[in-house]
Amino acid sequence: MHGINWTALSIFVGLFAFISWLGFAAARWRRGDLEQLHEWGLGGRRFGTVITWFLVGGDIYTAYTFIAVPALAFGAGAVAFFAVPYTVIIYPLLFLAFRRLWHVCQRHGYITAGDFVRGRFGNRWLALAITVTGIIATMPYIALQLVGIQVVIGALGVSGSGLVGDLPLFVAFIVLAAFTYSSGLRAPASIAVVKDLLIYLTALTAVIVIPLELGGFAKIFAAVPAKQLLLATPGPKSTGSYSGYATLALGSALALFLYPHSLTAILSASSGKAIRRNAALLPGYSVMLGLLAMLGFFVIAAGVDKLPEYAAGFKQFGSNFAVPALLLHSFPAWFVGIAFAAIGIGALVPAAIMSIAAANLYTRNIHREFINKTPTDRQESQVAKRVSLGVKVGALVFILFVPTKYAIQLQLLGGIWIIQTLPAVMLGAYTRWFNAWALVVGWAIGIITGTWMAVETNLTPTFPLSVAGYSFPGYTAVYTLVLNLLVAVVFTPLLNGVGLRGGAADETVGADYSA
Amino acid sequence: MVADNEKRGGWSWWYVLFIIEFAVPLWPPLYNRLEPTVIGIPFFYWFQLLWVLVSAVLTTVVYFATAE
């Protein structure tokens, strides 16, 4: 690479130092007893509309998103824009289904999806299935956040072989682990405010200044190869890229709030009203994501990928280097420092929430359910803190020793797996009609079929389903969710018929699900 | 189904707006075109961005119409 960019690096380090201090100071913010799991792991459910907006926004629009979506636009064109419909249709779901979940979880002191399913269906094995799926789907997601940090550190010119090159990532990781341990969810909540302000500043500046430098949007889009500008029109007897695009958006949206980190952020809100308001306010982030996606085209128009000074970066990080290279090319060093810090900090926020969410799941639905049934509050929060550390060490080891492409592939599989919890969690917020064992069977068949389909398509998201000579390419997660639901619907009357009870009585009543 | 949802938190006709919000972006033939452009941005891109704003407005309408 081209030597260390000292100005940018100093600003980057300075902002990192600031948010590290903030992360530790957050322990005293809206002070609560951090020896209790709901205080450490849910911020005491005290976040109002504004903090929830920053927290959920920082959680689901991650640094990796801001690197990967423009990278996809740069490499593949129009299809990258599926992120926009995806982040539109999540909000009706948030407003309707997940508000119900918030109410019932608040009323019964549930901290995780596993807690809810255990209480609703009275079956700890179903709850275990939900829990394990959540933890496994989260792990590669954390690893990908670290990739986001790795790319910007590399782009700052800090490089080296072996452990020296990995040292900055290591330091960022220790800081992350330490403030998460001491402050719990309050740390990412406070840092999210800083991170999002920086991200908005970067995004707005980039979409205004760069098109001016490049001579306007018309010129930019003219530089993009014509066949990348739109989705390919489907051929005869196929729904082609249209069904691929729509199912990718739909499946990603259905999966999103089932991820433990999303649910953790939602459950930390102080009221159902804060959730519903956020369903109307969070699309602000979707606009920004759409604008950022277009940065991929700016890269093509600016010809950054052809410049010799960035060749090494593209070689090392592939198209994930597109956005950092564009920022380096277009802005003075001090602004690059701010922008890269936004991306780097943007990785720490979701990584912290993800590790907290995984820790909550383990503590409540594995440790308390199967190992120590009567922990004290203090023991429970201690277990969670240690597990959050363990989860992050796992992600770090993964990123340092396993090629990035496996993290990406595992994250793809994670999406297919987590959507299989939809019948129990999201539909469970509406009905207990399903037999819990039928849900377990549906879940298992969904996971097995989904994994098989993903392997068949060489770990790409779209599966070319053929029926009677017609081809319907679509997101594997959606197809396998349909299969899962069919199985659960067929098995429920069957199992009820042979007298197999799903589990203990429902702890919840209808009135628990609304204000 | 369990007669859970009768009272509050049940169905409201305002939720039809959500169906519109949901269905339009899931139908790509509707917007997979270049023209008309706005300040040089092809229709495919600006329409989907505009739809984010439309959705936010629709959700706001539902929020106030169904206030608890």
Image (cartoon, rainbow, N blue to C red):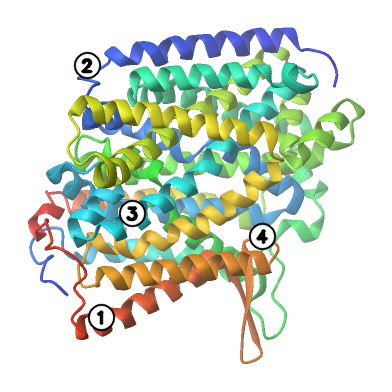
Disc 3 target residue = A128
Along the horizontal axis of the image, is A300 left or right of A456? right
Q: Do marks 1 and 4 share a subunit?
A: yes
Residue B28, visible in the rendered structure: no
Q: CA distance from mark 4 to mark 2?
A: 45 Å
Direction from residue A370 to residue A406 in the image, left or right: right
Foreground mark, 1 or 4, reads 1
Residue A203 in the image: x percent, y percent? 58, 31
Q: Which mark is residue B5?
A: none
Q: Secondary structure at mark 2?
A: loop
On whether disc 2 and disc 1 are found on a single subunit, the reply is: yes
The numbered mark 3 sits on a residue in which chain? A
Chain letter of the residue beneath label 1 in the structure image: A
Q: Identify which residue, A87 or A116, lies in the foreground.
A: A116
Mark 1 or mark 2, which is nearer the start of the sequence?
2
* Pointer 2 chain: A
Q: Position of residue B48 (x, y in %)?
A: 54, 54
Report helix, strand or loop for mark 3.
Answer: helix
Q: Residue at x 62, y 27 (%)?
A: A149
Q: Which is in the foreground here, disc 4 or disc 3?
A: 3
User: Of the residues under marks 4 and 3, which one precedes in the sequence?
Assistant: 3
> Which residue type does callout 2 highlight?
Arg
B44 lies above or below A490: above
- Disc 2 crowd rating (10 Å Cα; few below 14, some 14-19, many 20+) is few
Task: Say whether marks 2 and 1 touch (CB < 8 Å).
Answer: no
On the image, which quarter does residue A273 sit in? top left
Please, what is the three-letter code of the amino acid marked with disc 4? Leu
Q: To which residue does mark 4 refer?
A: A459
The residue at the far bottom in this view is: A468
Gap in angstroms between the C-alphas marked 2 and 1: 49 Å
The subunit letter for the residue under badge 4 reads A
Residue at which label 2 appears: A31
